[in-house]
Amino acid sequence: MSSYLRLALGILPGLFLFGCSNTDKKNPLVTETKSVEIELSVPHSEGKKSIYLGCDSKPISVIFHNNTDSIVRMYEDWNSWGYYNISFEITTNDSIYILQKGPGGWWKNFPSYNAINPGESLVFNFVLEDSFCFPHRKVIRGSYRGWNGLPHKNYDSAKIRVLYELKDGISLQMVDSVTAKDPALQRSFLSGLTSKQYDVRIVSTF
C-alpha cells in the first residue's frame, strides 16, 4: 500500500511545515513563477524542531505542492520506479549524511504513479528507522526495510533538506513501456527537485 495522502494545501495538525520552492530545470512544467514546492513537516519537541533517527523514530512528512497549471506525476513509492526517489541530506558541523532507503525487493512490481492536479498536494510519510534495527527482516512486498546513512549520535544543531530524483538507472523509455509511448505523459513526470535547508535538532534513538 502506498504511503501517501492526497490533500488540498492542507496542514497536518501538531506539526510544523517548512516551505520551499525550487525551480526544476529538467522539467518544462516548472517555471520561475509557477513551480512545484516541497514542504517538510517534523515533530516539535522541547522547544525545538527535532528529527528522531534510529530504532525508535518519529514520523516525518514530505509534502509536494503543485503550483503549476498542469498535472505533475510521480511514481508511487511502493514500486521500484518510485521507491528510491526520495532521500534526505543532513549537514552537521562535522559530517554530511545522505539518508536513503535500504535495498528493496518485490514479488509484484509495476510502474503505478500519482497524478497531482494543479493546486493540489501529495504527502509522503516516513519513519526514518535505521536498517540496522531490522537485522532479520525479510524483503517481501509491503515489508519495512529501513534506511541507510543515518547519524548515530545527537546534534543540537543541524540542517536537513529533501532530495527528489528520478534515478538515473530508471529510464522511462526502457522500463515503463506505457509511458514511453506517450511523450506528453513523459514530460509530466517530476524528474528532480531539491528543497532548501532547514534548521533542526537530530536525536539519535539507537
Image (cartoon, helix red, strand yellow):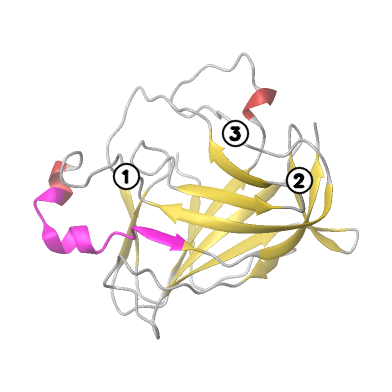
Helix or strand or loop: what does disc 3 sit on? Answer: strand
Q: Which residue corresponds to the image point at 64% horizontal and 42% vertical from the top-left?
A: 127
Please state which of residues 7 and 144 is positioned toward the viewer in this rendering.
144
Residue at 29% across, 59% down:
189
Depth order, front residue of 173/1: 173
Where on the picture, by quarter, is residue 149?
top right
Q: Which residue is mark 2?
A: 52
Q: How many marks?
A: 3
Q: Is residue 190 magenta?
A: yes
Classify 138 as above or below 58.
above
CA separation in Å, label 2 and label 3? 14 Å
Tell me the element at label 2: strand
Q: Amino acid at mark 3?
A: Asn
Question: Disc 1 and disc 3: Cα gap in Å?
Answer: 19 Å
Q: Quadrant of the N terminus?
A: top left
Stretch of the chain drawn in magenta: 180-193
Numbered mark located on residue 168 in the image: 1
Q: Residues within 10 Å of mark 3 (few under 14, many from 20)?
A: some
Look at mark 3 in the image and give the residue it sits on: 148
Based on the picture, tell me whether residue 145 belongs to the magenta stretch: no
Q: Is residue 188 left or right of residue 22?
A: left
Q: Position of residue 179 (x, y in %)?
A: 17, 50
Q: Quadrant of the C terminus?
A: top right
In the rendered view, does 77 fall on the left or right side of 126? left
Residue 15 seen in the figure: no
Q: In the rendered structure, which disc, 1 or 3, sits on the residue that comes first in sequence?
A: 3
Using the image, tell me which numbered label, if any, was put on residue 146: none
**Quarter of image, res 100:** top right
Q: Position of residue 17 (x, y in %)?
A: 66, 68
The location of residue 46, given as percent across then percent down, is: 91, 58
For label 1, the crowd category at 10 Å Cα-Cα, with few meaning under 14, some 14 to 19 and many 20 or more, is few
Say which amino acid is labelled 1: Asp
